[in-house]
Image (tube, grey):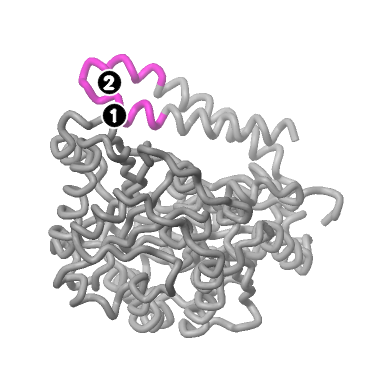
Amino acid sequence: MSTSKPLRVLALDHYFDQDLKALEAQSALSIRRLPVYRLREPAIRMMGEEVGMGFESGLKLFTSEELRLARETYARWLDKEMRGIYLEWPFDIVVLPSDIFFFVRALPTIAHALGLPVVVAQKETTVSPETMEFEAPIVGRYAPFISDWMAVCSERQKEYWLRVGADPAAIDVTGQPRFDMYAHATPPDRKSVPTVLFFSYAVDAYVPEADLGQAVWQELRDETERVLVALARASKVRIIVKHHPQQERRGEVDRLRALAGKSWGQAFVVADPEADTRELVLAADIIVGFQTTALYEAVAAQRPVVYAAWGKDWERHLDRLIPFHDAPPGCVHHAQGPDALRTFLESNPAPPTPDSRVWCEEALGPIDGRASSRVAKGLARVASDWPQEAREGLGRHRRSYLVRMLAGASAAEMFWLAARVPALVLGRTGGVVLRQQRAAEFRKVAMRGLRD
């Protein structure tokens, strides 16, 4: 592998966009994103929907004897798929946001047979007490670390993977690429009508699997939202709500629209689902949230943070939650009830003190603007240790493969384009448009490959 050329990285894009954006800015890397649907959807078809539901239950099912034949079938399909992807765009290394997902468990073995390493640039950051104590043994039993190297954000994240059973020599603390943006952030200017960014959450988030589906945080979230709406209606703040990707957005938006009333769309708005969390944090004057890593991010960004947490359910689950309530002075403002939340927001709370960086980096790792560079260097080091002979043999068939791919994708695109008219008559255009778009995507990939 020539050191003068960028390292070709095939990266699985699964809730990984911000880290990939940071890595894509590294001139030493040339990254092609592999959309998660290309692996997850076939895996679901072969193994059934239940394998993707729940955490422990899904992992148990995936590893069960019941699914052995389905796993083998999927592994054969994945082997063919990876060979095809390599012929589309020869890459040097595979990067995953994690290797615990059922649809990538066979990937390291397959990639190794092709002479390719697989590494994890771990997307997860904060580790709650519950995650450390209860989740690590489950992962260690059903989905232990199987890749060649892992970059993690912090020593605490490394401790988690050591508890899972990973080899310490295979893990490096690099910081989190997506947090490089916060390295030189400064506190916001004070405004008469500050912008408050509220990180919403599902009412059954952050609870044990046995409590999933229960409205554990309903009262807490409702009380928090009522305070925010009242202040927005009084023109004391401007509220932006950022939903968690796993919340049911349409229903949540309808619910908040009814709650906000006349302030909706003006003093009370909902962030676009594709909005970059980091940019929202940096554009806000105050951050309000519950159990989101974004509170640590906001401290790193020197934004005043109000931790809205109170009530009997919070107290009951306290030992399992991220201990924002135990943060040292100068890090976050803990609102222990609706009145306290209102007071904090009306008083334009102070930003974190310089000493807060130490507390913040215990959870997020070093925030010095160089995490992306450290990860890029780690990828290059791992890739350089792998011989290319197996890849070169596969690459000799590349042009004929791309010609066949171009012909097939072009035909499929024309077919689905023609199908749009009858689909429109039947009111079923959604699936047809998606298939046409995917065929067009494959056609473009083939054309780019032939131009290489």
Instruction: Tell me: residue 124, above or below residue 43.
Output: below
Kindly state the secondary structure of the residue where label 1 is placed: loop
The residue that disc 1 covers is 266
Residue 94 is left or right of residue 391, and the answer is left
Residue 379: x and y in percent read: 70, 62
Residue 53 is left or right of residue 411, and the answer is left
Foreground residue among 117 and 246: 246
Estimate the spatial distance between the alpha carbons at disc 2 and disc 1, rounded to whole Å: 38 Å
The residue that disc 2 covers is 423
Foreground residue among 433 and 234: 234
Task: Note whether residue 81 is visible.
Answer: no
* Residue at image point 37% right, 67% down: 69
The C terminus, quarter of image? top right
Residue 372 is left or right of residue 104, and the answer is right
Q: Using the image, tell me which numbered label, if any, was put on residue 407.
A: none
Q: Amino acid at mark 1?
A: Gln
The N terminus, quarter of image? bottom right
